Image (cartoon, helix red, strand yellow):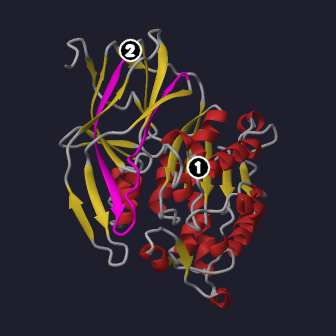
């Protein structure tokens, strides 16, 4: 029987961190990581799915509560012929330490046939995530939402009053990237590499990592421009290769335009541009990428590159081409922009790392590799001489 002493707290902007907008729905609120204006400028289903998955989004508050309940309506995606993915996890952090994990029962399910693109929608019911035995003293609590499933927030209950968290003066880090930044194959939402790096770097994360959708879109650049940030990073490359959406001629000006737009709103904010991590299938082979149908028939999810290395002569992009171009562009712009920095993604995960920690599906890092990338990012970006050092920020 439910306790008669539950206190219900409205889920509003003052306790939701990491979202750019909360949409009112039939059931409650849906966190978005792109504003409505941006969403209205692109009808791509992949982007719509990715930006509505709350990677990096968390509820943050202070309370003496020992019990918490969060009603949610998840939307999960399964793939025909592949074992169902585990239910998304909610990570509970108290004073920055992971103390509990849970999943929400119920929810909607979308089954996707990757060979035809057809999708079957099965509506589900609202579920409840419960956390108990929290310490009774006043504390900062964070509930990190699943990074890999859409999550409508319905109701938040506690056995003691909730108040907004204190402003501890942490710098806001705004990051944009692909599915790797989104958190593909990470163990849980607070252990995706940007979340781990933010924790070690004592920064408040806003994660605009969109699976399959880091494509230098102007509306994403405008979202970065218009969002408050003390530190900014953009990780560019892999999606431009595996979607095969542009050629070398268009790539350079598109990078310049993307960075120009960010600089309109953040002229002196430390801005770190990161090239792709090591990924053998696309190092010197262009896209488009595709599902490995032989693996699918065996019930496994893997990716392949379908391009021809000879096509780079005609302007097709590979990771090697993109790294060279980004390094050149950042070097050129840095002559007039002292707050612009470059990081070769292979410093985070390179060829030697792949021999020890191979990409399980040929494209995305696993949980251990997310941790490795996060730790290395801290050593590069938050180091005393790094792009996100106090000295760079205060210059």
The residue identified by callout 1 is 367
So how many labels did they put on this image? Answer: 2
The residue identified by callout 2 is 65
Q: Can you give x and y, in whole percent of width and height, for residue 278 in the image?
A: 69, 65
Q: Quadrant of the N terminus?
A: top left
Quarter of the rendering containing residue 350 = bottom right
Q: Can you give x and y, in whole percent of width and height, for residue 166 in the image?
A: 50, 19
Q: Can you give x and y, in whole percent of width and height, for residue 219 in the image?
A: 44, 59
Does the rendering let one see residue 228? no
Viewer-closest of 236 and 122: 122
Is residue 345 covered in magenta? no
First to last magenta residue range: 67-95
Q: Residue at x 40, y 45 (%)?
A: 88
Viewer-closest of 393 and 144: 144
Mark 1 or 2, closer to the camera: 1
Q: Quadrant of the C terminus?
A: top right
> Badge 2 local density, few (<14 within 10 Å), some, or many (20+)?
many
Tag 1 secondary structure: helix
Viewer-closest of 10 and 281: 281
Q: Residue at x 68, y 51 (%)?
A: 272
Give the mark, 1 or 2, whose residue is nearer the N terminus: 2
Q: Which residue is outermost to the top? A: 137
Q: Can you give x and y, in whole percent of width and height, for residue 54 in the image?
A: 41, 45
Q: In this picture, is 52 found above or below 361?
A: above
Tag 2 secondary structure: loop
Q: Residue at x 21, y 57 (%)?
A: 122
Mark 1 and mark 2: Cα distance apart in space: 31 Å
Is residue 69 covered in magenta? yes
């Amino acid at each position: 029987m439910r306790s008669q002493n539950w206190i219900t707290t409205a889920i509003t902007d003052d306790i939701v961190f990491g979202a750019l907008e909360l949409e009112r729905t039939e059931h409650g609120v849906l966190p978005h990581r792109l504003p409505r204006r941006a969403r209205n400028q692109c009808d791509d289903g992949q982007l719509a799915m990715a930006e509505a998955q709350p990677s990096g989004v968390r509820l943050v508050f202070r309370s003496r509560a020992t019990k918490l309940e969060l009603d949610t309506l998840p939307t999960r995606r399964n793939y025909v012929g592949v074992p169902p993915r585990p239910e998304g996890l909610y990570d509970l952090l108290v004073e920055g330490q992971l103390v509990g994990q849970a999943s929400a029962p119920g929810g909607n399910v979308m089954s996707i046939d990757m060979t035809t693109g057809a999708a079957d929608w099965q509506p589900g019911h609202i579920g409840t995530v419960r956390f108990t035995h929290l310490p009774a003293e006043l504390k900062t609590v964070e509930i990190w939402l699943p990074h890999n499933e859409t999550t409508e927030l319905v109701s938040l209950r506690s056995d003691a009053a909730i108040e907004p968290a204190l402003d501890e003066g942490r710098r806001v880090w705004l990051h944009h990237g692909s599915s790797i930044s989104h958190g593909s194959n990470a163990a849980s939402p607070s252990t995706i590499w940007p979340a781990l790096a933010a924790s070690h770097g004592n920064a408040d994360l806003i994660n605009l990592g969109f699976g399959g959708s880091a494509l230098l879109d102007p509306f994403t650049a405008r979202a970065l421009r218009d969002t408050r940030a003390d530190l900014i990073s953009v990780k560019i490359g892999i999606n431009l290769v595996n979607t095969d959406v542009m050629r070398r001629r268009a790539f350079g000006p598109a990078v310049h335009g993307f960075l120009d737009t960010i600089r309109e709103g953040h002229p002196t904010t430390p801005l770190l541009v990161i090239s792709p991590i090591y990924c053998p299938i696309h190092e010197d082979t262009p896209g488009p990428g595709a599902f490995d149908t032989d693996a699918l028939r065996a019930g496994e999810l893997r990716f392949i590159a379908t391009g021809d290395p000879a096509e780079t002569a005609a302007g097709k992009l590979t990771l090697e081409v993109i790294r060279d171009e980004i390094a050149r562009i950042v070097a050129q712009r840095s002559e007039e922009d002292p707050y612009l920095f470059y990081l070769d993604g292979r410093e985070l995960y390179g060829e030697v790392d792949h021999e020890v920690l191979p990409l399980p599906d040929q494209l995305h890092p696993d949980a251990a590799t997310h941790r490795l990338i996060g730790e290395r990012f801290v050593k590069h970006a938050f180091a005393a001489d790094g792009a996100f050092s106090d000295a760079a920020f205060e210059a």
